[in-house]
Amino acid sequence: MFIVLKEKLWAYIVNNNPDLMFRLQDEYGVVKYLEEKVSGVMPLALRLLEEGKEGMAIHELCMEDLTADLKPSRFNYLTTVISEEFETDYARLRESGMLTYEAVNLVEFCKDTFEQLHFSTANEDDREIRYAIIGKVAEYLEKGRSKKQVVDSKKH
């Protein structure tokens, strides 16, 4: 069960929190992180097993516990904002293979805004947060365009 939960947690992180994935990889902390998180949920898994819960139900409940502090995904939120509010940029980034890279950078760029507005599952649909993040994304994308124009002008 320990190994299965580690694999499921890693798959969740890869799909929903690539910013964390890259940070853990850069710090060579993947194994330690996964083992500490899963070790922390094992008492719950054992209790559920003793209660006669089935394996899939145990995995599901343990995953809810393991991923609680990873939700909502800032990465997924930002990619949704880009796709809905900056369609041209979204298409360009997706086609160039840079969407994940730029969305991961945006997680860090928008970190203070997310924290100041206490972004959570309870308020992820809040319009004030969305507008603040749209403003930060626009600022980030504009900086990227400005850098590209400077590079392009030096080429000519």
Image: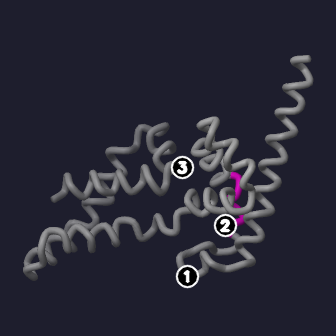
> Could you say where residue 134 lies in the image, as x and y percent from the top left?
76, 63
Q: Position of residue 92 (x, y in %)?
A: 70, 42
Q: How far apart are labels 2 and 1 at the CA level?
A: 13 Å
92 vs 52, nearest the viewer: 92
**SS for callout 3:** helix
Which amino acid is tagged 1?
Ala
* Residue designated by label 1: 122
Q: Which residue, given by chain and number where applicable, does mark 2 sit on?
A: 114
Residue at 27% from the left image edge and 74% from the top image edge: 61
Q: Nearer the viewer, residue 40 or 148?
A: 148
Q: Which mark is residue 19?
A: 3
Return the x and y of residue 64 as percentages of the image width and height.
34, 71
Provide the residue span drawn in magenta: 109-115
Identity of the amino acid at label 2? Phe
> Spatial distance from mark 3 to mark 1, Cα to Cα?
22 Å
Main SS category, magenta section: helix
Q: Residues within 10 Å of mark 1 (few under 14, many from 20)?
A: few
Q: Which residue occupies 25% across, 60% down? A: 39
Q: Are marks 2 and 1 in contact (CB under 8 Å)?
A: no
Q: Is residue 153 magenta?
A: no
Left or right: residue 69 versus residue 142 is left
Which sits earlier in the primary sequence, circle 2 or circle 1?
Answer: 2
